[in-house]
Image (tube, rainbow, N blue to C red):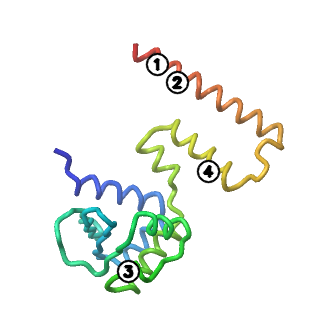
Amino acid sequence: MINIKKRFNKLLNDVRESSPNLRNTLKEISPISFCISLKDQKKIFIFISDNNSDISFEESDTQFEINGSFLEILYTIVSGKINRNLIKGDAELAIVFFNAIYKSNIDFIYLIDKYFGNLPAVFTYVIVNKVFDTPEIYKDSEERNLRKSLRNISIRLDRLEAINRT
């Protein structure tokens, strides 16, 4: 059986490793306990401390609760603006925690590489750069050639993996 607490601690440590800002901020505000309550879903109880964090579906004391639909919470994460109506309990702590996560510059490419491998990380990196950084993707011929080379390498790796499986 999967030990969720152990996996959550490992994930949390990897997130801290990918963002020194978050590590320092969590040290300042921890221990922190909260609940995420999505509409029509079981409540998720999260406790974050230095070395003993936990996530579960069992009822426990919390400092605040984030209560809303999936779309409301997703909008909050994407926009970076917290709707105070979603928070029950210590709203000030919830806002400090949310801002700590939102402004921590977590290296998601590093986490994707660590958990899913090189290819998904490369693809994510290219997609993120394409979507957020460059309005005119194929204007530069050097960049276009580099992207073409990366695509060819990716195809070759996929073929090698397929050959190794058979």
Where is residue 100 shown, x and y percent of the image?
46, 74
| Mark 4 residue element | helix
**Residue 87 circle label:** 3
Mark 4 vs 1, N-terminal side: 4
Q: CA distance from mark 4 to mark 1?
A: 27 Å
**Residue 162 circle label:** 1
| Mark 3 residue element | strand
Mark 4 touches mark 2? (CB < 8 Å):
no
Bin the neighbour count of mark 4 within 10 Å (Cα to Cα): few under 14, some 14-19, many 20 and up.
few
Which residue is pictured at 80% across the width and 37% down the height? 142
| Mark 1 residue element | helix
**Vertical relation: 53 (above or below) 108:** below
| Mark 2 residue element | helix
Q: CA distance from mark 4 to mark 3?
A: 30 Å
Residue 54 image-quadrant placement: bottom left
Residue marked by disc 2: 158
Q: CA distance from mark 1 to mark 2?
A: 6 Å
